[in-house]
Image (cartoon, rainbow, N blue to C red):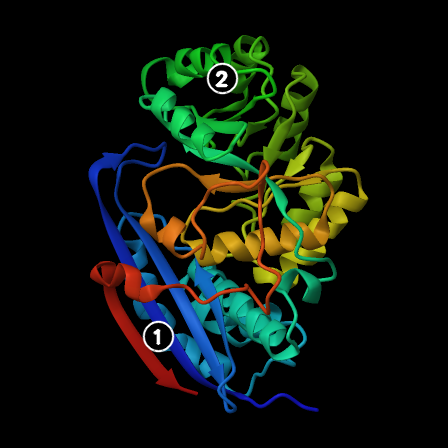
Amino acid sequence: MTAPALSKLEVFHFRHALPEPLVTVMGPLAHRPALLVRIEDAEGAHGWGEIWCNFPPGGDLYRAQLAINVLPAALGGLSADTPDPFDTILTRLHRLALQAGEPGPVAQLASGADIAIHDLRARRAGRPLAELLGGSAQPVEAYASGISPEACADQVARMRGLGYRRFKQRIGFGPDDGLESAEATAADLRAGEALMLDANQAWDLDTARRRCDRLAAVAPVWLEEPLPADAPPDHWKDLARATDIPLAAGENLRGAQAFDAAISGGALRYLQPDICKWGGLSATARIARDAVARGMVYCPHFLGGGVGLVASAHLLAAVGGGGFLEVDSSENPLLSVFSGRGLALEEGRFPLLNAPGLGFDPDTAAVADLLTSHREARL
C-alpha cells in the first residue's frame, strides 16, 4: 500500500545559553543550539530529524529561518516511500545552493529532513529505525567526547560516573596546543580506559608531524582531524606514514566523491561522517557500509541535540563494524533531554529502545524555556 504524501513540516529551534563560553579551535561558543524538524503525512504519522547548526556562532538562527523558508517546497509530494530522500531533496535545492553559494547549509537541511522521513517510514512500518536500516536495535559502544583541556579532570570524572570508559579530548588550541593536558588525562586513565584526541583541523603537515612525535607516548586510539579536511591527499598519506597513531576524519567531508577518496586513500583508519551535516541516513548508510567493507571502522560524528544522537546510534547498530557512538560531554540539556533517556550507559553501552522509529518522541515541553522559535508549514 502506497504511503500518503507529506502534509506538514514543523521546525523547532532551541538555544541553551552557557554560563561560560565554550572555547574551541573555531572560537568561543556562547550557546548550544538544536534545530529539530518534525514531518507529518496526510494520515497523521510523523517522524523527527535534526539539522546540524553549530557554527558559526549564530548560524543556528539563520538555518532555522532557511529551513522554514525552503524545505516546504523541497518536501512537496514526498512520502515515507521516497527511496532516497537526501538525494531527492538536495537535487531540488541544487540551484539554490549554487545561487546562494551555500552548499553546506542546504545539505544540512536535506540531511535533517532525510532523517525525519526515515523515522516516519520506520514508525509506519512498526519497526525500530536500526531494523529498517538493515540491522537490529542492539546497544552500541560509545565514548565521551568534547573533553576540554581546561576542564578535563572534571569532565572525565562525570562521564566515568555515567559508565563511559573511552574519552576524547580536544587539542590544537590553548597553551602548548593542549598537549600537556592530554598527557595528564592519559596518565590518569584507569585500567580498561582509553583516550582519543581531536585537533579539529588545527595544524599544517609539518606541525602535525611534530605533534604526533610527542603524542606517540600517549598512544591514543586515534588522532582526529590533525589536518584540514581539504588538505592535499598526499599530506594525509605522508602523515599516516610518519606516525603509528591511527588517523580519523569525516565530519567535514561533503559529497560521495570526497568520501570515496577518503575511504580509498588509505590514510584513515576511522571514518566519521555526520548524518546531520551531510548525507542524512540515506547517503551515510552507503558510505559507512563501504568503509566497513574496506576494513575501516565507522564511528559516527555527532555534535548537537538528542534526536541526531539517537539516529546516529541506530545507524551504527545497523552498520556494525566495531565502531563507537560519539556522546558529547559538554554542558547541553538539549542533548540529554532529547535523547529520550539521558546519556548514561547500561553495561558499558548506549541502549536503543526496541520501539518504532527512533523509539520515542523528543520531550520539547521539558525544555520549553529554551525554545527560540517554532514554525510550521503545510506542504
Give the label on residue 207, or none. 2
State the image quarter where residue 154 is shown: top left
Q: Secondary structure at mark 1?
A: helix
Query: Horizontal placement of 255 versus 135: left or right?
Result: left
Q: How many marks?
A: 2
Q: Residue beneath label 1, please?
A: 68
Q: Residue at x 44, y 30 (%)?
A: 161
Look at the image and tell me whether residue 198 can be seen.
no
Q: Nearer the viewer, mark 2 or mark 1?
A: 1
Q: Quadrant of the C terminus?
A: bottom left
Which mark is first along the chain, 1 or 2? 1
Inter-mark Cα distance, 2 to 1: 43 Å
Neighbourhood count class around disc 1 (C-alpha, 10 Å): few under 14, some 14–19, many 20 upward: many
Q: Residue at x 29, y 66 (%)?
A: 365
Q: Judge whether 368 appears above or below 274 on screen.
A: below
Look at the image and tell me whether residue 229 can be seen.
yes
Q: Judge whether 267 appears above or below 29 on screen.
A: above
Three-letter code, disc 1: Ile
Neighbourhood count class around disc 2 (C-alpha, 10 Å): few under 14, some 14–19, many 20 upward: few
Q: Where residue 165 sits: x, y (%)?
A: 54, 28
Q: Quadrant of the N terminus?
A: bottom right
